[in-house]
Structures are given as C-alpha cells and as structure tokens.
Image (cartoon, rainbow, N blue to C red):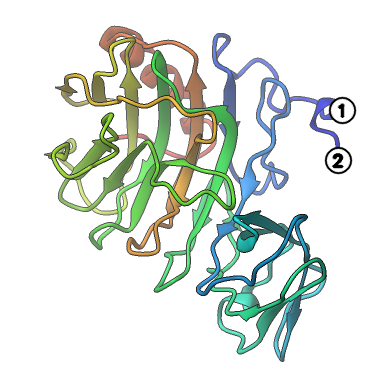
Amino acid sequence: MDPSTLQPMFQGLAEPDAEGHWLFGSDNPTMADMISGHLMTPRLSQVLTAGGSGYTVAPTLTRVGSGQSVPQTLTASISGGAVNGYTETDPGSADATAAGTVSVVGGGTGAVFSPGIAPAPTHGAGTLTLADATTNRINGYQTPFEIKRDQTVCLAVKRKALANTTMIVGWWPAGVTRAPLWMVQVTAANYVAFSRSASGNFSGDGQAVAPPAGAVGDWLFLAVTHDAAGARRIDWGNGPTYNQAGVLGLSDPNHRVGIGSNVPAYAGGGEFAELMVFPAAKTASQVAAIYARSKERLLARGITLL
C-alpha cells in the first residue's frame, strides 16, 4: 500500500508541528501516523550465522520446516556479498518457537539459518505490546524519520517489572551492523539513557535516574531531546528534567527513531500508547505542554498518564 494514499487517523488530535505522530491500538492496525499516514517498519531481525557469500542482489528467503505461519513476506538485505539481515512483514506467533529454518535461494552461495524472530505484536485498546525479545531474537518497529540533532521524541510507555524489559531506541535498517545512535531502557526502578558519541561508544554515557514516583503498570510520558550541540535532555511528563552535555556525536541517515529492541542482548519489548517525533529541540516547558496534551488525548482513550 502506498502510504501517500492513506488518510490520516484521528483528525485534529495530532501535534501540528510534529513530523510523525502515532496513536497505537486495535483502531490503528496498520500503524499509520496521524499526520501523513507514515507507516512504521516492523520486526527487523538479524540472522544468527553468516548468510552465504557472492550475492550481488538480495536473494529469495523462504521458511522451511513445521509450524511456520502463512502468509508471510521475508525480505533479505545483503552486505559484503552475504545475507546479514531481513524483515518479516507478515509474522505469526508460531514463528517465535517453530523448529523450522529459513532457506536462502538464488544469486550466490546459499545458506540456511535460524530466523530468531520474536512473537508478533499485539494491538489492544489504545496500546501496542511488543513481546520481550529472547536470545538471538529482536522485536520492534522503526519510523521513517532519521535520528539527528535538533530533534525531540516523545512517547507514552508502561512501566514494567523486570529490568530492561522496555527499550526506546534509534534503529538501523536491515543489514547494517552498527549500534543505535541512542537508546533508553525503562525499568521498574529507573531508566538508563545513552547517546552515541563520535567514538561510537556508549560506555561512558550512561545516565541512570529515577522516574516519577509510582508503581509497575503506570503509564509514563517520556521525552528524549538532542539539541544542535548534541546534548541530551530527558524529561518525564510530571517529573524532573535531566541533562547530559555533548553526547550525540554522530548523524547518520541509516538510523531511524524506533521502539522495541534491536539488540538481542536486551529484552526489549514493552507496551506503548503514543509516539511523536519533532524536527526541533523542544525546551522543557514546551515538552511539559506536549505532555499535558498527551495526557488529555490518552485519557479519552482510557489510558491515564502518571
């Protein structure tokens, strides 16, 4: 489907200066945004072994073995002549546990590898739930918007009980092996925010702080802002603001704003109600106003932001 032909949903509710604004749930199964009908790209996965060699064009991928879901669409990516990633756009829950593999056919020396795909997402009443990723599996969605300086990402996310169960990240397309430009892990006790420096290293950048008082199951509003100098600011909707100077040292068009896990070492997953991407570094007071509007929007959809 051509996204340009889609009609924006929930007319009048979108933030007018946002690039993209999504309300999730069973009333938006296509994951179209309210401004221009932008679709999110689902379920980027990576292979577990080298995917053959000698490929000059992406080969055909086919699931084989028992328990595979139908229909499904597997699209391969290649790098250095090898298949090193793919997306699955019609997944089924059986794909997470089935014993089958994926075969690579055509164009080079083929290989067979384990798909490693997490369970399909669930659309609820105003919510999108991504299953926790497990070993060698990742699960999430990416927007069409590049990560850059002078950008603010706001979202509503549910606090969960287990450490590292929810991630908000900067995705990369299939086949690219670099880490995300930034990521936030939301846990029951705190969040840890990272943004890649020019060295491409997260290690010295962690920012672990407590979210607003509350309990597991609370809905939280979280904003991540990078200004023109690369400094990061984190805002809770009804809580404090935290700053970290000069941490986003890279600007790479291969990276996209996304939700869920793209690193198999982390659980990922999580439950989301709303996502907004702004092409400007919002001030803390501007974010507070966005939070107030988000709280009103979501309350009408049966979700109470803390």
Question: Which image quadrant: the N terminus?
Answer: top right
Q: Residue at x 41, y 36 (%)?
A: 156
Number of numbered discs present? 2
Element assignment for label 1: helix
Q: Residue at x 54, y 28 (%)?
A: 253
* Rendered image quadrant of residue 285: top left
The residue labelled by disc 1 is 5
Q: Amino acid at mark 2?
A: Met
Determine whether label 2 and label 1 are within 8 Å by CB. Answer: yes
The residue labelled by disc 2 is 1
Instruction: Give the side of residue 192 with respect to residue 74, left or right.
Output: left
* Rendered image quadrant of residue 134: bottom left
Q: Which mark is residue 234?
A: none
* Rendered image quadrant of residue 208: top left
Question: Horizontal and vertical percent for residue 259?
Answer: 47, 44
Question: Which image quadrant: the C terminus?
Answer: top left
